[in-house]
Image: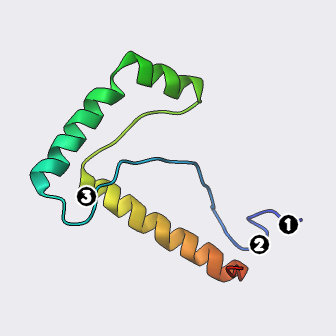
Amino acid sequence: MPTVAEMGFKDFGTSPWYGLLAPAGTPRDIVKRLQEERLKAMKAHSVTARLTADGAAGGGGPPEEFAAYIAQQQKVWKDVVTRAGIKPD
């Protein structure tokens, strides 16, 4: 089986990620509050301990930054699916 690089995906890398999303059109003040509360939760010992146990790291930034990351990931995976000829069953 060829490696990912041998299949033509130079500098390919991936890692799992998670995020908190709200429905489109959610008022900005609600989004801001969700972000503030998420940041508080990420500092809780129980959350940091769980992340550490899972070999993960918490992070996060403004919603616009996360939206840009999601858009970038969609482009990456669309290219992978297209180039690999993956079709839904």
Residue 27 found in image quarter: bottom left
User: Disc 2 to disc 1, how far (Cα)?
Assistant: 6 Å
Q: Earlier in the sequence, mark 3 or mark 2?
A: 2
Q: Earlier in the sequence, mark 3 or mark 1?
A: 1
Q: Name the kind of residue labelled 2 in the image.
A: Met
Q: What residue would you read off at disc 1?
A: 2
Marks 2 and 1 close (CB-CB < 8 Å) = yes
Q: What colouring style does the render use?
A: rainbow
Image quarter in which the C terminus is found:
bottom right
Q: What residue would you read off at disc 3?
A: 64
15 left or right of 75? right
Q: Name the kind of residue labelled 1 in the image.
A: Pro
* Classed neighbour count for the residue bearing mark 2: other residues with Cα under 10 Å, few (<14), some (14–19), many (≥20): few
Q: Earlier in the sequence, mark 2 or mark 1?
A: 1
Q: What residue would you read off at disc 2?
A: 7
Point out residue 12 in the picture as x, y percentages from the top left corner. 63, 61
